[in-house]
Image: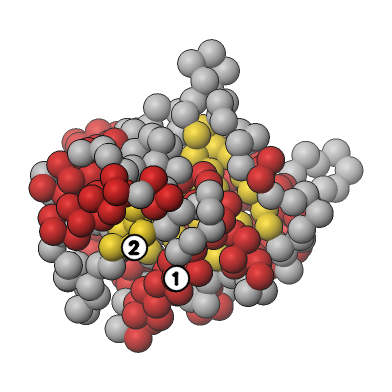
Amino acid sequence: MTAGHPFPDPESLAADVTAGRRAALASALNLLDDRRPEARRCASILLARLQGSATGMENSRLIGITGPPGAGKSSLTAALMRVWRQRGLSVGVLAVDPSSPISGGALLGDRLRMKTSHDDDGVFVRSLACRGEFGGLSAEVWPMSQVMLAAFDITLIETVGVGQREVDVSGMCDTTCFVAQPGSGDSIQFLKAGILEVPHVLVVNKEDMGAVARRTLSELSAALGREHGEGGWEVPVLSVSATVGTGIEVLADVLEAHHQHLLAMDMLRERRRGYQAAWIVKRLRGEFGSHGLEQLGGEQVLLRELAVEPTSLYEQYEVLRSRLLSK
């Protein structure tokens, strides 16, 4: 930051983020959360610089962990982080928590931090409030994930457990992992209702519960249409115990296998462009409504156009927003 200027220089901040400096990461994420016009301008430059090295970002994994309350997502996230660190991989986590009805802040903000080492520069955890956003994710998650991808080998998004509403993560992450709760019929019903067509990996946690966990594993396997429709990827159903530590290495291997599958099929860059397009359209709909989208040619036309343009996130959004405001 310069004297009399409350915002960091986005050019140098982008370089520091790419170098994985923790103070720069915190500063960048705070900048993306700032609504002031000057902060928006700086954030736009920052993301443009980071996304300009999109080829390098393809070596980074963007993984979503989702599932119903009580399934043990946080424990599983912590167990995965330990395995990845043992393998020499750096990990950034965006933990999306239920919002406080009073402050709007994250109720469970310190939940995961207590399970990770503050002395480990290869781990960075940021808690976000979902702020009542339909779909279980807050608006800042996609821009913040771009910062994390530039800094870490693995970026993990762990979402608030809100049942059938928790679908946004599938439209944002390269690999979506659904964590099922043993003995709960919700996961089976979600599969049958088509809610769980989105996961690339299914995990039954708490296998140390014995028979009830094995029964849930069997039921999920039977209910699942194994091929996800993405170049022949078959959705695996795994059994793990985050508490005991069993099955975590295998899960980490499977998550890596899906990333390699996307690269081999040349699907990763196209998917991420599609996620960005969906983020922009959703924000425009929230501000201008369906009528605003129609003035820009309609949602499907917008999605197609945005998915092929190489410009950065906020640049695309502000150009379209200005077009609508001028009308």
Amino acid type, mark 2: Leu
Query: Which numbered disc covers residue 32?
Result: none
The percent position of residue 92, horizontal first and vertical second, equals: 60, 57
**Colour pattern:** secondary structure
Task: Tell me the residue at 85%/48% (across/down).
Answer: 2
Amino acid type, mark 1: Val
Q: Secondary structure at mark 2?
A: strand
Relative horizontal placement of residue 58, taking residue 41 as reference (left or right): left
Task: Tell me the residue at 39%/41% (across/down).
Answer: 71
Contact check, label 1 and label 2, Cβ < 8 Å = yes
- The answer to whether 32 is drawn above or below residue 288 in the figure is below
The percent position of residue 303, horizontal first and vertical second, equals: 25, 58
- The answer to whether 270 is drawn above or below residue 65 in the figure is below
The percent position of residue 309, horizontal first and vertical second, equals: 36, 68
Looking at this rendering, what residue extends furthest in the bottom direction? 264
Q: Which residue is mark 2?
A: 238
Task: Tell me the residue at 35%/77% (across/down).
Answer: 262
Between 5 and 72, the one nearer to me in the picture:
72
Q: Secondary structure at mark 1?
A: helix
Looking at this rendering, what residue extends furthest in the front direction? 211
Task: Tell me the residue at 44%/70% (across/down).
Answer: 250
Q: First in sequence, mark 1 or 2: give its number.
A: 2
Looking at this rendering, what residue extends furthest in the right direction? 3
Query: Which numbered disc covers residue 250?
Result: 1
- The answer to whether 99 is drawn above or below residue 112 in the figure is above
* Disc 1 residue crowd, few under 14, some 14–19, many 20+, Cα 10 Å: few
Q: Is residue 234 visible?
A: yes
* Disc 2 residue crowd, few under 14, some 14–19, many 20+, Cα 10 Å: many
Query: In which quadrant is the C terminus drawn?
Result: top left
Quadrant position of residue 247: bottom left
